[in-house]
């Protein structure tokens, strides 16, 4: 479980919700330490499938880990028709999840701009206030009462939270932000705020222009002006943060480049487009992963 997942687990527990982190190799108690605007919190959570049927399953592993993480619990999820909330960088996990779990499991998609950082000891810091957007992805729709109760629960834990009937646009906007910030900060091993420097100005704008061109072809209402303003604001708001791709590459771990830039490039090809600047970044990250 990554930093954002641990942040959500801790904040849900602190809000009074019973939380059971899942991992195939962990069934014991786990100590959590969270530092946020309210101070430092120490919690002890019980790993493993809970005794009482859960209300929902929040999936916060990396995109390439989603299906593997869900597979051990697939029978329980199918039997309970347990709603899933997929919360990760990038896109492209919805269809594999449906193939694994069937069409009777409600799958929600979420995007968060909260910042979280986990150190080597598992201590999580809430490094940036943001918001979470959530919406229906596939499978049966939730009843209005259950949907509202689930949103209220999540918002109490980590506000604010917004429900949208257009979650795909929110996911594309988050992917656009990540496609500019994450590969550049990973390759240059710099904090997000460094991208505001003049040396990155041309490359940043070329990347944004390619995104805007693709969105125009795909009928996604994200123009160059909005993309520029949003990405610039994100760089400023998270200036001291190190992106997850930055940390993964520094630690020799696999990055999420396939779910972010890889997904973007694949979708662009469906529209007959070649995004040269994004392709160069993708190739550079894939090469760096092999070093």
Image (cartoon, helix red, strand yellow):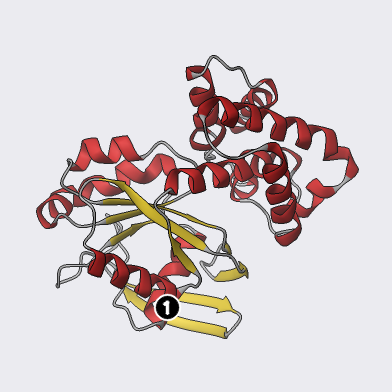
Q: Where is residue 164 in the image (x, y as percent from the top left)?
A: 42, 56
Residue drawn at (56%, 47%) of the image: 174
Q: Position of residue 277 (x, y in %)?
A: 70, 25
**In the figure, residue 237 lies in which quadrant?**
bottom right
Residue drawn at (58%, 70%) of the image: 126
Return the residue found at the far top.
272
Q: In terms of depth relative to the viewer, which is nearer, 175 or 162?
A: 162
**In the figure, residue 208 lies in which quadrant?**
top right
Q: Mark 1 points at which residue?
A: 156
Q: Position of residue 127 (x, y in %)?
A: 63, 68
Q: In terms of depth relative to the viewer, which is nearer, 169 or 237?
A: 169
Q: In this view, does 50 lie to the left or right of 28?
A: left
Image quarter where the C terminus lies is top right
Residue drawn at (73%, 55%) of the image: 233
Q: In terms of depth relative to the viewer, which is nearer, 34 or 16?
A: 16
Q: Where is residue 158 in the image (x, y as percent from the top left)?
A: 48, 72
Residue drawn at (73%, 52%) of the image: 192
Residue 202 drawn above or below residue 71: above
| Residue 118 visible in rendering | no
């Amino acid at each position: 479980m990554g930093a954002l997942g641990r942040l959500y687990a801790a904040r849900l527990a602190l809000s009074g919700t019973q939380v059971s982190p899942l991992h195939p190799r962990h069934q014991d108690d786990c100590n959590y330490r969270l530092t946020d605007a309210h101070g430092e919190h120490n919690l002890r959570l019980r790993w493993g499938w809970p005794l009482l049927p859960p209300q929902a399953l929040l999936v916060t592993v990396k995109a390439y880990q989603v299906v593997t993480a869900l597979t051990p619990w697939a029978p329980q999820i199918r039997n309970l028709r347990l709603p899933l909330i997929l919360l990760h960088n990038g896109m492209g996990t919805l269809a594999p999840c449906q193939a694994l779990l069937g069409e009777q499991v409600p799958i929600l998609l979420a995007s968060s701009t909260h910042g979280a950082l986990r150190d080597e000891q598992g201590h999580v810091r809430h490094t940036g206030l943001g918001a979470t957007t959530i919406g229906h992805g596939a499978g049966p729709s939730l009843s209005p009462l259950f949907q509202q109760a689930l949103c209220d629960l999540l918002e109490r834990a980590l506000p604010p939270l917004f429900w949208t009937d257009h979650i795909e646009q929110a996911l594309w906007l988050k992917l656009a932000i990540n496609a500019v910030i994450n590969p550049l900060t990973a390759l240059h091993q710099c904090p997000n705020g460094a991208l505001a420097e003049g040396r990155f100005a041309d490359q940043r704008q070329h990347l944004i222009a390619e995104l805007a061109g693709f969105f125009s072809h795909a009928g996604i209402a994200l123009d160059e002006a909005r993309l520029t303003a949003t990405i610039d604001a994100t760089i400023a708001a998270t200036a001291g943060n190190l992106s997850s791709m930055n940390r993964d590459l520094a630690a020799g771990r696999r990055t999420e480049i396939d779910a972010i830039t890889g997904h973007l490039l694949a979708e662009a090809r469906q529209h007959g487009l070649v995004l040269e600047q994004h392709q160069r970044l993708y190739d550079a990250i894939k090469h760096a992963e092999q070093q």
